[in-house]
Every structure is written in C-alpha cells, then in structure tokens.
C-alpha cells in the first residue's frame, strides 16, 4: 500500500473573527497562498468550502480559530512548500495575526494514498499530539516518522 502525508494546522486569530481589520492582509493573501499550495509539486488535496478556503469551517466552535487541512505526496513536498516558497514570508509574520497556540499547532500523519482525512480525524490527530506527544500517530517536522510498511 502507498501512503500520502496529511497535515492539520490551526491558529487563534488576534482579531475577533476573520473579518476583523487586523486580519485584512492575511485574508487578502489567502487565495495567493492557497493557489501556490495547489500548484506546488506533491500537492494532493486541501480542505475548502464554497469560498475556496477553510476560514468558515469551525470544528472548535470558536470564531477566532481557523483550521487548514491538506494532503501531500510526501514529507519533502510539504516541507518545500512550507519553508521554501512564498508561504515562508507569511510564516515569518505569523505573530502579527495569530496568538501563540500551545505546544503544537500542527500535526502530520500518514494515510492511504486513496484517502483524504475527515475534519474530525484531523482534529483528533492534533488533539492526540497535544495530549500524548510525538508518535507515528501524529508528528511534526521536529521528529518525523516513516511511512507505514507492510508486515
């Protein structure tokens, strides 16, 4: 069986919601960054609604928390997009728009390449990482886990 890499990341906005003026520059660049992700080598899928982003998807029942879920062919593809593309410019400015969010604000895991994660699964993976630490169930770039192997 072949696997893809899924990831979830969340952030607590400094604005009261996505329409707060403090969030304007971030919002103005969502389409650019989402388009960059979709055109990046190794990109497979991302969570989005009819507005073509996920800012209205609210699994935490909190208007200040936004969520992103995506699937990539491999770790290197996600790493390239995250840390070596225009996306990096926004990562460096994260503190302008978002509060610090605990020990882990993102998680990654392997899933069969024919699947995409449900929002519930993605949230559960991040919660598991926050409560139990790094494992092959949910991990970060700080400690990577290899794809599952057939036994």
Image: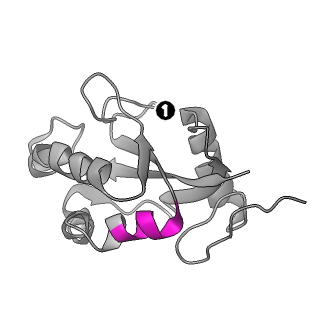
Residue 54 pos. (x, y %): 34, 35
Identify the secondary structure beneath mark 1. loop
Q: Nearer the viewer, residue 108 or 127?
A: 108
The answer to whether any part of residue 103 appears in the image is no
- What sort of colour scheme is used for the picture? one colour
Q: Is residue 138 magenta?
A: no
Assign the magenta stretch its main secondary structure: helix
Q: Is residue 27 left or right of residue 92?
A: left
Residue 89 pos. (x, y %): 19, 69
Q: Is residue 75 magenta?
A: yes
Q: Residue at x 41, y 36 (%)?
A: 47
Q: Please identify the quadrant where the C terminus is shown.
A: bottom right
Q: Residue furthest top?
A: 50
- Count neighbours of disc 1 (C-alpha within 10 A) and say few if under 14, some if 14 to 19, many if 20 or more: few
Q: Is residue 145 left or right of residue 43?
A: right
Residue 84 pos. (x, y %): 29, 74
Q: Is residue 54 left or right of residue 15?
A: right
Q: Residue at x 34, y 26 (%)?
A: 49
Q: Residue at x 21, y 63 (%)?
A: 90
Q: Is residue 100 above or below residue 116?
A: below
Q: Residue furthest front?
A: 1
Q: Is residue 107 above or below residue 135?
A: above
Picture quadrant where residue 50 is located:
top left
Q: Nearer the viewer, residue 57 or 70?
A: 70
Q: Which residue is mark 1?
A: 59
The answer to whether any part of residue 134 appears in the image is yes
Q: Residue at x 57, y 42 (%)?
A: 123
Query: How many numbered badges does the structure rendering display?
Result: 1
Residue 100 pos. (x, y %): 38, 63
Q: Residue furthest bottom?
A: 142
Which residues are drawn in magenta? 74-80
């Amino acid at each position: 069986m072949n696997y893809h890499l899924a990831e979830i990341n969340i952030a607590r906005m400094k604005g009261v919601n996505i329409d707060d003026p403090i969030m304007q520059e971030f919002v103005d660049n969502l389409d650019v960054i989402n388009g960059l992700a979709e055109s990046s080598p190794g990109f497979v899928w991302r969570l989005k609604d009819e507005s073509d982003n996920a800012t209205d998807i609210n699994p935490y029942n909190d208007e200040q928390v936004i969520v992103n879920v995506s699937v990539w062919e491999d770790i290197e593809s996600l790493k390239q997009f995250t840390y070596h593309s225009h996306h990096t410019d926004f990562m460096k400015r994260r503190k302008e728009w978002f509060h610090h969010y605990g020990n882990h604000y993102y998680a990654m895991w392997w899933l069969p390449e024919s699947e995409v994660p449900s929002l519930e699964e993605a949230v559960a993976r991040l919660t598991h990482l926050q409560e139990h630490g790094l494992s092959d169930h949910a991990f970060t770039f700080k400690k990577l886990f290899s794809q599952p192997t057939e036994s």
